[in-house]
């Protein structure tokens, strides 16, 4: 049986895995509302968008269009930052329809699809596939990585970010339904086992790591009476002045990574990998 998925159209969106489109088992549905409202005012989101945009632009195909797929695009916030790049032919995919409703409303000209990367693959091949803070939500991350590899052309590039260090596990990880935080060895080994060579690996949230460590160690209890959305908002929304200061610290990380300096530790692990085999 082929593992190429077929789609049906639901609410104007191509759904390749409609059976899980409304389950919200691996991410709280209220998180999409929070992201849509607050993405532009979050130091973390704006910093990662600046960094990830620079990495996408640096790893585009040297000639012609780069066929680009984002796995787990959520509300399409990152795609909004690259949609004007005429060298990219963009597809955004998300497993849950709620995120795609926001994405399609905000960017009607972008090709957004519903797709569970563990269920199979869509019948296209891409030059670049990104998964930013996605595979930690997936029980079977090995299958997800294998399907990403299958959907890439030879010499295609995967850019993947994940939360790092299990000792940072906190209530926030539980609220957003993470399955794990990664070590560098674990992610690199899983990529290599699926035909990738590692071009670059670095930590992120390096400069702010001491502050993050303290906050996560203190955040070991969750008020169960709160909704997921309220609990998440409490942990990711900051006063404007503090948000601006934290953004300045994040720019130091961004500058080092743009220079090609691999940062030794941090809250996030970022890997650029190239497909070298089948």
Image: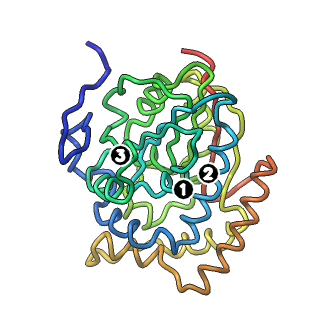
C-beta proximity under 8 Å, tags 2 and 1:
yes
> SS for tag 1?
helix
- Marks 2 and 1, Cα distance to the nearest angstrom? 7 Å
Is 126 located above or below residue 47 in the figure?
A: above
Left or right relative to 127: residue 250: right
Is 8 located above or below residue 74 in the figure?
A: above
x and y percentages locating residue 230 in the rendered image: 33, 76
Query: What residue sits right under mark 1 in the picture?
Result: 81
Other-residue count near label 1 (Cα within 10 Å), few / some / many at <14 / 14–19 / ≥20: some
Q: Residue at x 42, y 49 (%)?
A: 73
Other-residue count near label 3 (Cα within 10 Å), few / some / many at <14 / 14–19 / ≥20: many
> SS for tag 2?
helix
- Marks 1 and 3, Cα distance to the nearest angstrom? 17 Å
Residue 242's image quarter? bottom right
> SS for tag 3?
strand
Is tag 2's residue or tag 1's residue first in the polypeptide sequence?
Answer: 2
x and y percentages locating residue 30 in the rendered image: 30, 66
- Marks 3 and 2, Cα distance to the nearest angstrom? 19 Å
Other-residue count near label 2 (Cα within 10 Å), few / some / many at <14 / 14–19 / ≥20: some
x and y percentages locating residue 226 in the rendered image: 29, 77
Left or right relative to 106: residue 41: right
Q: Residue at x 68, y 67 (%)?
A: 250
Q: Nearer the viewer, residue 86 or 6?
A: 86
Query: What residue sits right under mark 2 in the picture?
Result: 53
Q: Residue at x 77, y 59 (%)?
A: 255
Foreground: disc 1 or disc 3: 1
Is tag 1's residue or tag 3's residue first in the polypeptide sequence?
Answer: 1
Foreground: disc 3 or disc 2: 2
Residue 205's image quarter? bottom right
Query: What residue sits right under mark 3 in the picture?
Result: 94
């Amino acid at each position: 049986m082929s593992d190429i998925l077929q789609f049906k159209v639901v609410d104007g969106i191509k759904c390749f895995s409609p059976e899980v489109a409304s389950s919200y088992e691996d991410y709280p549905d209220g998180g999409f509302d929070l992201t849509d409202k607050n993405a532009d005012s979050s130091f973390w989101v704006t910093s990662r968008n600046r960094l990830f945009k620079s990495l996408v632009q640096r790893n585009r195909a040297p000639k012609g269009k780069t066929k680009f797929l984002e796995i787990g695009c959520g509300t399409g916030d990152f795609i909004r930052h690259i949609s004007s790049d005429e060298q990219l032919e963009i597809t955004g995919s998300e497993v849950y329809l709620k995120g795609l409703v926001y994405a399609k409303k905000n960017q009607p000209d972008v090709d957004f699809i519903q797709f569970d990367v563990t269920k199979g693959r869509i019948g296209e091949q891409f030059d670049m596939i990104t998964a930013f803070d996605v595979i930690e939500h997936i029980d079977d991350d090995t299958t997800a990585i294998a399907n990403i590899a299958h959907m890439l052309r030879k010499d295609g590039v995967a850019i993947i970010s994940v939360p790092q260090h299990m000792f940072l596990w906190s209530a926030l990880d539980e609220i957003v339904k993470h399955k794990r935080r990664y070590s560098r060895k674990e992610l690199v080994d899983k990529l290599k086992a699926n035909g990738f060579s590692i071009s670059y690996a670095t930590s992120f949230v390096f400069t702010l790591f001491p502050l993050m460590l303290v906050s996560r160690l203190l955040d070991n209890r969750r008020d169960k009476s709160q909704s997921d959305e309220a609990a998440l908002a409490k942990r990711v929304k900051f006063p404007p002045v503090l948000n601006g200061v934290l953004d300045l610290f994040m720019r130091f990380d961004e500058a080092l990574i743009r220079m090609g300096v691999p940062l030794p530790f941090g809250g996030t692990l970022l890997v650029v990998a190239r497909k070298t085999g089948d």
